[in-house]
Amino acid sequence: MTAPTDPQQRPQNVLLPPLTAVLNSALQAGVVPAGLNLSLVTPVHKRGSVANVNNYRPIAVGSALLRLYARLLNQRLVEYTEAAQLRAPTQAGFRPHLSTEHQLLTLQHLVDHARGGPRPQALFCCFLDLKGAYDRVPRPLLWEALRRLGVHGRMLAAVQALCADAEYAVHIGGRRGDSLLSGCGVKQGCPLSPTLFGLLLDGLHSALLRGASDAAPQVAGAGAVPDLGYADDFCLIATSAAGLQRLLDCAHGFLSSVGMEVSAEKSRVLVFGPRTTEGSAAQAAGAFRWTCGGADLERVPKYKYLGVEISSAEGIGAAFGRLQRTMTATWAAVRRKYGRVQLGLSLQLQRALFQQAVPAAGSYASEVWGLRKLTGDARKGRARLSTLHAQFVKNLLHVPRTVSTTLVFRELGIQPLELGWLRGTVRLYNQLAQAPAHSLHGAVVRADWEDACTHNIKNWAWGLREYLRQLGWALPRDGNGLPELNARAIMDAATAREQACWQGLSECPRTCPTEHASLCKYARWFAPRPGPRLGSNPYVTLQLGLSRVLKIIKFRLGCHRLPIVALRNNNVPRAQRLCVKCASGALGDEQHLLFECPFVACVRAEYAHLFTPGCTMLEFMQQRDICGVACFILACLKIYLAPTVPNVP
């Protein structure tokens, strides 16, 4: 960056002009600068035997300058195709404002609509697996597809040059092999490749509509939906067993014409039967034999689609077992890596890493299932995610599972998973409620809402509507569709409901009812000052070493060996848990230790500057010198809990 002569002038990037000139020259000439179109390929082991080459995933890394060039080309191509509505409405992969959650929501809507309508029926799905899809793209067909979409001249030449001149060299252990030109497929590791692949494979949707649109389910306002695509993951959807076979035949014909090959060994058929007794469609499915290119396809009771396990019986309600395992594995990995990244001595950094990794692992696709009405094992599985989350937070502090989850969350400034699920669901609703008229996913949400209101189907919209009703929100329909939700107000209302347990507590922790004793004590003695954001508790950020900080946190949460806690484990009534170090007859609780007990008077005298006349316990804990308060607490605990040495005559 160059220093500006005018203080009001923004600094200029010295690299911007030459970079712009180089990239514009490449675009105008339709060529790639020599030596830049080389990618180094490193094989990364996935699973299984290290001696089997099929157990490795090749990762291609190219020039940073060329990646920038490809990103700019991709941005132009995406903006053009999206504005002109040239993309298949059922393809969501690598498209702006679309994600796997949109496809999962659409599939679950089709399942709910088929099962819960006035005439329940089965839904037949086939999840296709393409062999080496990106590597098999015939470039002449890709160029022809781009021309049909209106991509010509310099733009087409620039895209062709990126692929035609691409070279690859294997890079292992710091050593590089000879480079080879690529003659087929889209360029590996290039930001432009997913868009190019999608534009070519968008023809699959058109082929299915031409050949078997009557076999597909219908969405009000969007028409037939014979497929759902996410990059090279395709799901064919039909309302009958024979209809699914027709879709398979059409798909095989189109994919063969563009050089793609379906792996029959990995493709699967999943039949979602009606919620009532097995109907004729499901009975026919039991004996039906589906094929693709002459090869039989296996029918399975469950399948992992876009990272979420779905089943024929529960739909997306089968996701929670895998999510629990993923969340547990993520927490284990985080704990293993604390030492490697030197976080072991900082609770604040441990909390930050935990928040980035663990809740996300247990909340994938929660926009679709987070508020959904579930029963049986599915309901227990979702509740188990919240239990695991709370357990892992307590593990972070090394406190027993019996400690109140509410206290632990407030101490660390962590929200329950359910609030995150609500936030994501409202965000998805608002996005789709305002979607343009041609949007498939916008039509899906409107149809889902109509099913919930008209047929009382317990679907995604029904779960959201019921949750809002419990918060006191009504969601009216307006003349133009669905209204936008006030996300901030909804989150405030949900947070207030979560915090209702803190209302109406006794003023004195020593005399409050036993069932509210821990909450009352924390609220009146230890609650941190309201901060600008969650997690602003200054005791969590203390720089005293992890073990000492954890001792302070445990003291604040009531995890210590003072009589008020130790004698509770012996079933001693609370009024009889007296201090054992003095003859005052007072309860042996935290306030007695810090303010009253003569046994630690010497420590109190040393830290006299922390005490002001009339200071309450809460004011004492919230004062600015929290480092001094923490050291005072540690010193008191050390003396008070030290084993007593008997006098030897």
Image (cartoon, helix red, strand yellow):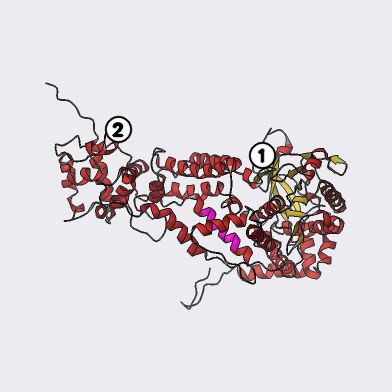
Residue type at mark 1 is His
Residue 500 lies in what quarter of the image?
A: bottom left
Residue 160 % position (x, y): 79, 61
Residue type at mark 2 is Asn
Residue 46 % position (x, y): 66, 39
| Foreground of the two, 1 or 272 | 272
Q: Is residue 426 magenta?
A: yes
Query: What is the secondary structure assignment of the residue under circle 2?
Result: loop
Q: Which residues are magenta?
A: 420-429
Q: Main secondary structure of the magenta part?
A: helix
Q: Earlier in the sequence, mark 1 or mark 2?
A: 1
Residue that mark 2 sits on? 571
User: Which label was assigned to residue 60?
Assistant: none
Residue that mark 1 sits on? 45
Q: Is residue 308 magenta?
A: no
Q: Is residue 241 left or right of residue 600?
A: right
| Foreground of the two, 378 or 85 | 378
Answer few, some or many: residues within 10 Å of disc 1's Cα (few below 14, many 20 plus, some between 14 and 19): some
Residue 482 % position (x, y): 62, 66
Q: Image height check: is 370 above or below 265?
A: below
Query: Most extreme residue toward the top, as rendered?
Result: 649
Answer few, some or many: residues within 10 Å of disc 2's Cα (few below 14, many 20 plus, some between 14 and 19): few
Q: Image height check: is 315 above or below 425?
A: above
- Residue visible at 39% across and 37% down? 400
